[in-house]
Image (tube, grey):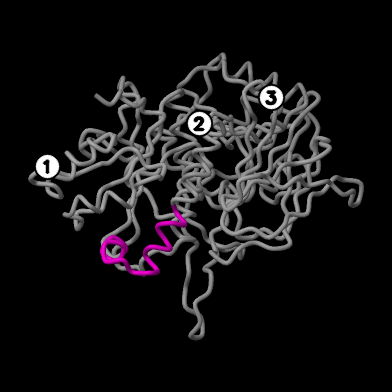
Amino acid sequence: MTPEIPSDKLSPFRWPSVWKDPTLLRLLEGGPINCLMIDESADSNGTVAEAARKAGLVVRQPSSLGAAPLAEVNWRSPAPVVALSGLVWPSIKVAPQDGNVQAAAGPTGAPWIDSNCWVVRLARVRAPGKSIWLEFAPPADAVPPNAAALSVAVADSSAAGARWIVSLGEKLSQGLAGGNTDAVKAWRGMLTTLRFFERHREWGAYEPWGSLGVLSTFAGDGDFMGKEVLNLAARRNLLYRILDRSAGSGQSLERLKALLYVDDERPSPEWKARLTAFGRGGGLLIVPRVLAVEFPGEKPLRCPVVGYELLAFGKGSVASPTRDWDDPFFLAADVHNLVSRRNDPVVLFNARSLWEHYSVAPGGRSELLQLVGFTGRGSDSVSVAVVRPSASAAMYVPEQEAPTILKPEKVDGRLEYHLPSFSSYAALEFKS
């Protein structure tokens, strides 16, 4: 009897409903996928499930996961896996312009990218120690995803510390079953990316880090604004850590430069004391207009953002808007300008279509910067400036077994790393 594989060691794949032939299991041979999610309707006589078990694979019914949208998850469930549905297909938005397809952009001109990273990060805060699985598939009306698109789907999930339940979509599944050359290439490219993250599974335990703490209940009256700020701040590559008000006031504020209190509801006495100590100790405290009276500042300071009042607050400062927050897009932009890139632990250059994930290993032994590119064309001439000194950085990409060691250069008084060209994903590990 094959021993049961722990949930945190499973690499799941949703068996396509159009695959009726169990011999297609050969596509999984030698790969990292070890768990099949098989609908009864896709395997009515059980032949695929039986063959999969004989091959040593774990077989589960998709319904057994109880996948649910973020707002409907039972966080108190004892299940070792939190499965999330209602997610986006990770990609850059495109829109036709003058007959050409170009990247769509938001009001600031930045590429409009769909990612699930903020959902994963909030789920990890609410379910610490549990495996987070994501259920999403290519849009049914879209061109079948190629190797780059599938690799982005894997990297967007894995960089945030989750598992994608690999779902190919009907068109790609049919092509792969028929031996279509492009479909086989896409499949093999995705397996390469999956293998890479299996080799670096320990990165999933690293803690997201950043200069900004975002504090909210992310529920009730704070549901929309709190969650959208996480989504839009991530789009801006504003590095942040999530602080869940409902989880108590004992959460670490270490190394934070600023705290954003999103909710209009007054903080508990414990949280008010911590926020006050944070601001008066030298941090920047950002609060909604209705709570400005709770944190009375002293002399006015020059504020870099129109529509905000910035006051001295002990050794630090407190900022509040002159009108209520009503648009999370502008709130994220305002907070980004208030916090300033100067306080980020890393700064990217020539990276408009890259999303960054910055995390720290348990015990602070090393720091990890993961870059996910969404264009599918690769990334060139990207530079990374770091605040903390480091003699070198190891750069990892899925296509190579061994890392490339990079040496920093001093540019305008700061250390910069100039990255070799890479496709959809790269990780830089800085050892302290």
The image's mark for residue 46 is 1
The amino acid beneath tag 1 is: Gly
The correct choice, above or below, for 9 with respect to 399 in the image is above
The image's mark for residue 364 is 3
- What is the C-alpha distance between the residues marked 3 and 2? 26 Å
**Is tag 1's residue or tag 3's residue first in the polypeptide sequence?**
1
- Residue assigned mark 2: 216
**Is tag 3's residue or tag 2's residue first in the polypeptide sequence?**
2
Residues 322 and 408: in front is 408
Q: Position of residue 209 (x, y in %)?
A: 63, 33
Highlighted magenta segment, given as a residue range:
172-190
Residues 104 and 429: in front is 429
**Is tag 2's residue or tag 1's residue first in the polypeptide sequence?**
1
Indicate which label's residue lies in the foreground, 3 or 2: 3
Query: Image quadrant of residue 19?
Result: bottom left
Q: Position of residue 160 (x, y in %)?
A: 51, 40
Indicate which label's residue lies in the foreground, 1 or 3: 1
The amino acid beneath tag 2 is: Ser
Q: Position of residue 349 (x, y in %)?
A: 74, 56
Which residue is farthest bottom? 99
Cβ–Cβ under 8 Å for marks 3 and 2:
no
The image's mark for residue 111 is none
Left/right of residue 262 with respect to residue 173 in the rendered view? right
- What is the C-alpha distance between the residues marked 1 and 3? 48 Å
Was residue 183 drawn as part of the magenta stretch in this picture? yes
Residues 281 and 152: in front is 152
SS of the residue at dot 2?
strand
The amino acid beneath tag 3 is: Gly
